[in-house]
Amino acid sequence: MLYISDLTGNQEPLLVSDVHITQQLNTVEQLDFTTINIPDNESAYKMLQPRSIITVPETGEQYRISENDGTTFGNNYQRTITGLQVLQDLDDHLIMDKLTGSQSLDSTMQFLTKGTKFTYTSHDSFDNFDFGEDGIGQEKALGLFTDTVMSDFNFEFKAHGYHIDIYKSLGEHNAFVYVSGSDIYTLADTGDYTQIRTHIYGVGKTTETTTENSSDSLQSSDSDDSSDDTDSTTTSSTVKAEYTSPFAKVYGVIDDDLFTDDNATTEDQLIQEMKAKLKDYPSIQYTANVNKFETNNPTDKLNDPTIGNWGYLKDRNDIDVETRVIQKDLYPQSNQEDTLTFGNFMLDPNKLIVEMQSNRNSDNNVIKKLKEKISQGGSGDIEQQFTIKKVGEVND
């Protein structure tokens, strides 16, 4: 059961099934469920209108209806509903003003939330950011928050209702140890190597300097006219930088697209921004299905899979990694197992090199032993492994 509130403030319990909550790091949460127009559900069913609010009783989180699809189901009508966390309401607010120059995170958040019901708390200290002369604004508030301000100040966030909590980094380390076959019953991984980049060029702010040289010529003592000849010279300088990742010694030099930031006024600032932008490692994620019965196990109380938390995954197939919770698929009103997605797993380039060198040495030893065996006349044993034996004939 969920609760639905319409635009007039009326609230009713709504009978539902297949409740699924998707939580992702630094994104707007999503709620999906189905409902049907049976007699006991009639009043609440009629409240499934545009912009109605759905509340999940297990968490108290609120979601605004964004999609509403229906189909016949026997003699009834069934609806599949999608709702987005009310943080999405920031997208209702168009900011017409501009914010320019050096700004604190507090002044920037005041700029974003002015005229809305949203509040915020910054739990860490952040340096000012210079938005330059062009500044930010004349955009929807949600896009500015997630696409611009979050990356400029380099923070992470979580939201509950109409309140936003901002941190330098969400979560805690050593928050869980999940073991395949115990806490989790399936563990899978996916790897994407297509986006690896190890080298990047960057261009920052261009500054123009104009030098003026004036000479006044007095034409005559009995005349009121004079002429001013002005010569000016304009020079420009552009902040430029390049950065090569330590992973270049593993994967080679792989160029990223040219990085530009008109607000970067120093080479060091530009390099720091390029390093943050460069994806110099493969995308490796683990997905695990959590045994729900383990939540009643006292040892499971030590595991805290809150979004952003760091911990360890272990199994019997040589997986023993430190990783981070980046997504949770929750099924709070059914027996279906919750799913946790962990990533991105960061590889240590020095360990990679040691591993590859170790594998190479091992391969060399195997090849050496094979050569010795062949030279000693043992090639027959090797050839026998690749001999196709005749096991029968087929008559035409």
Image (cartoon, grey):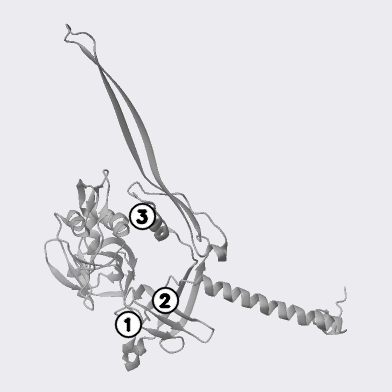
> Does residue 270 appear to the left or right of 215 in the view shown?
right
Residue drawn at x 44%, y 59% as measured from the top left: 278
> Does residue 355 appear to the left or right of 213 in the view shown?
right
Give x and y (percent) for residue 241: 44, 51
Mark 3 sits on what residue? 269
The answer to whether residue 389 is visible is no
Give x and y (percent) for residue 268: 38, 55
Residue drawn at x 20%, y 65% as measured from the top left: 53
Mark 2 sits on what residue? 323
Q: Which image quarter: residue 338?
A: bottom left
Q: Please, is residue 272 above or below residue 351 in the view? A: above
The answer to whether residue 348 is visible is yes
Mark toward the start of the polypeptide (1 vs 3) = 3
Mark 1 sits on what residue? 304
User: Circle 3 — which element?
Assistant: helix
Furthest toward the front, the residue is 221
Give x and y (percent) for residue 325: 37, 75
